[in-house]
Amino acid sequence: MDGTRAGPNPIPMQSRDLAGRKLISEQGESTEAFNLQLLSLETILDSVIDAMGDGVVAIDADGVLIVFNPAARKLLGKGPSVGPTSDRAEAYGTYMSDQRTLLPEQQMPLLRALKGEHIDNFPMFIRSSDRPDGFYIAVTARPIQDAEGDIAGAVGVFRNISDQKRTESELRDAREELERRVVERTLSLARANRELNIEIEERKQAEVALKASERQLRLMADSLPVIIAYVDAQQRYLFNNASYNGWFGLKDDEIRGKPVWEVVGIERYQVIRPSIEEALSGRAVVTEIEVPHRKLGMRTIQMNLVPDRDDSGAVQGFYAVGLDVTERQEAEAMERKHREELAHVSRVTTMGELTAALAHELNQPLTSIRSNAQAALRLMKTGRIDDDELEEILNDVIADNRRASEVIRRLRAMLRKRPMTLETLSLREVVDETVTLVRNDSVMRGVVIDEKTAPELPPVRADRIQLQQVLLNLIMNGFEAMRDVLAPKVLTIRARGTDRGNLVVSVSDRGSGFRDDTDLHALFQPFYSTKDEGMGMGLSISRSIIDAMGGKIWAENNSGQGATFYFTIPVAE
């Protein structure tokens, strides 16, 4: 569409440069050197751009979209806009980081880069009708200069920074799309070669067009803030972009044609060797490795290695795309720490709400111990000690002591601050322990707990304390939902298996339910609460816990009275 790179064959036979000028027809006599250049440049660069998990968008000097890779289409929810630049914020639903202000035209990263600015990790918020919750992205943009040093366009990388799991999914999709496009591109080039053999008289014109296209593609590859390389079956570099050179502090002739181990060093090569061999065996590889940067020191690189096959299906090399994810990993670690601290605060708050019930539960065995001890003293004072009766009293004291110790143990476990630790455990035990914890509180509130767990459930992989925290939060919410209910107050807890490798837990109340779909969509957002005195953090924390354990959580209104919360937990492998 107007020269926009948006499909599997991004460079048509009538190519255009960044300003939209037609290049000379690429059809002409085929030579072996021409074919190799065409394969090694257009195939590698086009396929790499299309394969990136991040969105890549480029504009020419007039602001017209000329590159719009599949990841950009997926991230922004639609293809390239043909409207004026002033309408693009509304077309793609792009907002400033406050989530309310549409991104002004003068703030658009690509347009700023067109003026010569270098934009790094510019934050934006994306929201549309089919994605009402929205998500944040970061944009890195650079101006593209022609051979004379004039700005001929701008290129930007759009990265989703909200959800690591979504990023991993996009990378998987990008790899599959890349493999499909490699095959299609190879077939397209084969057809082009046949046409070039027929029209041999136009070879010189095609060579001129090829050189211009080569300069354009090389310029774009060098403008991307990722490291790109192509390695053949003998593990020698045949291509690398400027970012790759800059990372290792080497020149083109110090990399091109050299084996991998000579460039990265024997020690580093031994680390990545299994991944290289797997890619050369025909399997796509995604891995994270520690690679020293010549200025920044040790950095974490996410490497995508995609096999390159010839027409017969034999692997003749692989494409390597590396993305520096050091800052992302540090941000994720900080997010995990904040989530765990918030979860601990939530547990402490919830246990505070149960103080009266826990005190009553602890007081019962302590009172019983005192009564039995007094009985033993009276028996000793009579001088008529019955060994059987004394043994029975002491056994009662031991049993009551165990009851009190168990209450204290459960309380300490819930209050202890600790990182999430996944282990194989019984879901039935977790449900039973949580119900035991709230049993006295339910009696004080006049609520009947109806708990049923399907028999012979497989074990799950989860954090025991944080899973109890989720259950405890849903149970306490159910109690609160039925506070003003006059009819019998029944809280129903169910656990069952599914055919998708998950267990499903449901907690149902007989309260008033939710007002409308707005409540259901916003329930798990931070600081949103349907209770006047609620802080709106419990369900948000519960969702982050379930997400971290590989499950999902949602809520529905019951067909009759009240509402039901559901969450899934993966079965342990």
Image (cartoon, rainbow, N blue to C red):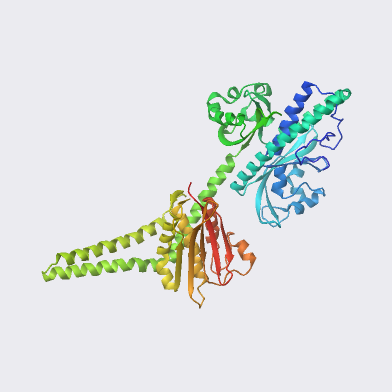
Most distant residue in the right direction: 201
Q: Residue at x 61, y 65 (%)?
A: 519
Along the horizontal axis of the image, is 70 left or right of 204? left
Quadrant (top left, top right, bottom left, bottom right) of the N terminus: top right
108 and 309: which is toward the camera: 309
Q: As displayed, is residue 534 above or below residue 292?
A: below
Q: As displayed, is residue 396 above or below residue 425?
A: below
Q: As displayed, is residue 187 above or below residue 56?
A: above
Q: Is residue 15 visible?
A: yes
Q: Residue at x 41, y 63 (%)?
A: 437
Q: Residue at x 42, y 72 (%)?
A: 444
Provide residue 62's location: percent of width, then percent of height: 83, 42
Provide residue 342's location: percent of width, then percent of height: 50, 55
Q: Quadrant of residue 28?
A: top right
Q: Is residue 223 visible?
A: no
Q: Quadrant of residue 453?
A: bottom left
Along the horizontal axis of the image, is 268 left or right of 405? right
Along the horizontal axis of the image, is 364 left or right of 250? left
